[in-house]
Amino acid sequence: MKHKLTIIAILIYALSSCALNTTDNGPLTIYDYDSYGSFINRQYSSNPLDISRSLLELDEYLGLSETDKAQDTTFNLLIEMGNGIYKYQYISKGSKVYCTVDTKNSRLGTDIAWSCQASVTPVNYSLYSLDYVSKFSYDGSTCFLTGENEKFEARFISEDPRGLQRWSVKIEGTDFSKAKEDLIATFASDGYINITEYFDEERIVNKASEGSITYKVYNKGNLIKKYTYKLIP
């Protein structure tokens, strides 16, 4: 996940006076802090889960016979580039995952981590995409997706007869601002976040998260704001 992301604009503007309490439009509100918390949850929790799930599917595909591989429809596009490198498009669970992965000619569950470069686009936001460069591993019960500045882990809990799943995830890392070099935010989930899939009104699979994320915003190394965002399903 090597990348620099914009901490929501209203927080950046507030730092013009090196204080996170006012903007040109008046005082910051709980909504502003919650908006950034929602961004963290989507960027570092929900999207990495979609990537992780697609990589687990690829590992299952690699274990199939050549006959079963030819009949498999898990991936909308899957290209074997050679030397253990694959490029694929995976559309499921309300998102589109585009990924290039180097399996190092290994299977998951070994001591060798895969390298992947991926983007995630929700199916109801066709022009919306976020990019990740990460290492991925799986120990048989827990997925680990690790970028230069972020760590994500996920454990599968259950799946209902409709195919809707429940997961438990944990996140931590640092988010860098593109617009202001000295502005950063550190974040971590408070324990595990429970993610439950459901069908929305358009019958698209969406995710409900329960838990909390605490983040701290710094400007030039000085703590500007500490805030806990509550995830309510």
Image (cartoon, rainbow, N blue to C red):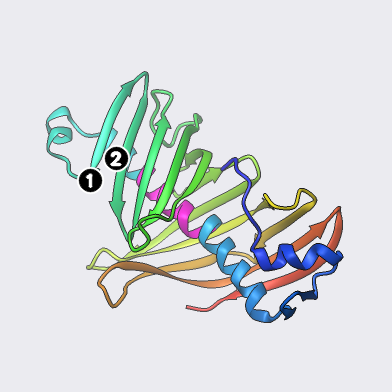
**Taking 142 as reference, is 117 above or below it?**
above
Secondary structure at numbered mark 2:
helix
On residue 74, the disc is: 1
Decide if residue 58 is on the left or right side of residue 6: left
Mark in front: 1 vs 2: 1
Q: Residue at x 18, y 30 (%)?
A: 65
Q: Residue at x 56, y 63 (%)?
A: 39
Residue 204 sits inside the magenta stretch: no
How many numbered callouts? 2
Q: Residue at x 32, y 23 (%)?
A: 81
Decide if residue 222 is on the left or right side of residue 217: right
Can you give x and y, in whole percent of width and height, for residue 185 in the image? 72, 57
Structural crowding at the residue carrying mark 1, measured as other residues with C-alpha within 10 Å and reported as few (<14), some (14–19) or many (≥20): some
**Taking 76 as reference, is 40 above or below it?**
below
Which stretch is magenta?
A: 45-55
Q: Is residue 140 visible?
A: no
Disc 2 marks which amino acid?
Answer: Glu
Residue 48 sits inside the magenta stretch: yes
Q: Is residue 219 visible?
A: yes
Q: Quadrant of the N terminus?
A: top right
The CA distance from mark 1 to mark 2 is: 10 Å
Asked whether the beta carbons under mark 1 and mark 2 sit within 8 Å of each other, the answer is: yes
Q: Main secondary structure of the magenta part?
A: helix
Q: Of all residues shown, which one is farthest toward the top?
A: 83
Residue on which the image places disc 2? 60
Can you give x and y, in whole percent of width and height, for residue 101 in the image? 41, 33
Q: Residue at x 49, y 39 (%)?
A: 136
Structural crowding at the residue carrying mark 2, measured as other residues with C-alpha within 10 Å and reported as few (<14), some (14–19) or many (≥20): few
Secondary structure at numbered mark 1:
loop
Decide if residue 106 is on the left or right side of residue 16: left
Disc 1 marks which amino acid?
Answer: Thr
Can you give x and y, in whole percent of width and height, for residue 155 in the image? 46, 56
